[in-house]
Image (spheres, helix red, strand yellow):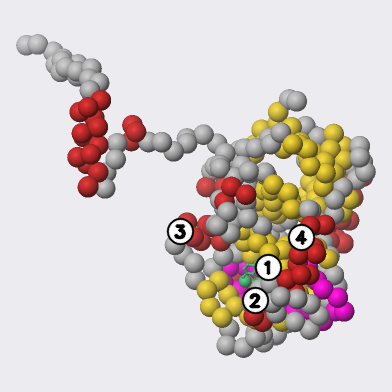
Amino acid sequence: MNAPQPHSFHVPEVNDPVALAAFKAQIAPLSLMPLWERTNRLVPGSECVPAVWPYAQTRPLLEQACGLISKKQADRRVLVMENPALRGSSYITNSLFAGLQIILPGEVAPSHRHTPNALRFVVEGEGAYTSVDGIKIQMQPGDFVVTPAWAWHDHGNLGNGPVVWMDGLDTPFVGLFGAHFRENYADDTYPVHCSADASVSTYGFNLLPTQHQRAATDGQPPLLVYSFERTRQALSHLAASPDQSPDAAQGYKLRYANPATGGYPFTTMAAFMQWLPSGFRGQAYRSTDNAIFNVAEGSCRVEVGGQTHHLTAHDVLVVPPWETYRFEADSHCMLFSFTDRAAQVALGFWREEYLSS
Ligand code: GTQ
Ligand code: FE2
């Protein structure tokens, strides 16, 4: 008896472009296409480009908008920072939304809720608050504020001057999944049932209520505000400790953590504060993060996309995924940033690389 012949059948080498084109046309009406004719890119990076929004440019425009539309009319008086390669999308990268919001004394941004997660980084001004599911949070410059998905939120300004903050949302994720829900609250403001900083006094001290263990670990971040004061203290202690050296590319860098899990404050977004010491010359670096930076204090230079940008306080920089960039600081610089790293890590996609320059 003969042993079975594993390769006994004949696969012809064919390359008949006319027949292939006819085949493609034949299957097209059935919503089918040949994978071998795929044209989209299969390399890291996106069509997004690096870009800077200098605060010296955006600040007067925010003020101009105040004279053109009321908070009530606008709902949220926000200048959306659109990536120059994504005009019309309202997104700063393929995965993130970023805007600058201004609120005048006495104004209220009416309460609503939506499935996208939101974060605020306070840029300028005193006296604003945001109320998140009835917890009233005072907003100080440099504070990082968390508005979890589906939490009711309204904003107000009880101070004497305008308040500006940067909004970061994961709206494109919700769009990708077709899961964007949104509703307005019946009144302008949701009833406040907690005094200021209730989330901080409960969750801000390495203590967790045992009864709330499940709620605190089911993904919703329990801590809603990370003060600039304490972040700055933690960073300066880190920088001063003898057993810590700065990261070659990022300087001294802290990640904002969900105190109940140690993980990211959102399922999608990560947030960071970093300090570039005076004279810092960073190593070239790239990662798959879609990253948005906001200069909290000081100034620095960034080399990205073949250009050098000088950044000063409150300037916004977007670095697209897998784009090489390099920081330098002559005097010190404090940089806030948020990225889509939480989602990328959870999904197993995130990568980084330090490059020799
Ligand atoms: O403040 O609730 O920039 O819902 C975009 C969507 C801000 C907000 C934005 C929003 C908000
Ligand atoms: Fe909102």
Category of crowding for the residue at label 1, using alpha-carbon neighbours closer than 10 angstroms: few (below 14), some (14–19), many (at least 20)? many
Q: Residue at x 89, y 50 (%)?
A: 298
Disc 3 beta carbon < 8 A from ligand 1?
A: no
**Marks 4,1: beta carbons within 8 A:** no
Which residues fall within the magenta stretch?
147-165
Marks 4 and 2 sit apart, C-alpha to C-alpha, by 18 Å
Mark 4 neighbour density, 10 Å: few (under 14) some (14–19) many (20 or more): some
**73 above or below 347?**
below
Q: Residue at x 22, y 27 (%)?
A: 18
Mark 3–mark 2 distance (CA, rounded to whole Å): 27 Å
Q: Amino acid at mark 3?
A: Phe
Residue 206 rendering spot, x and y as whole percentages: 76, 62
Q: Which residue was labeled with disc 3?
A: 177
The dot on residue 74 is: 2
Point out the tag, 4 or 2, that comes first from the N-terminus.
4
Identify residue type, mark 2. Answer: Ala
Query: Would you say the beta carbon of the disc 1 residue lies within 8 angstroms of ligand 1?
Result: yes
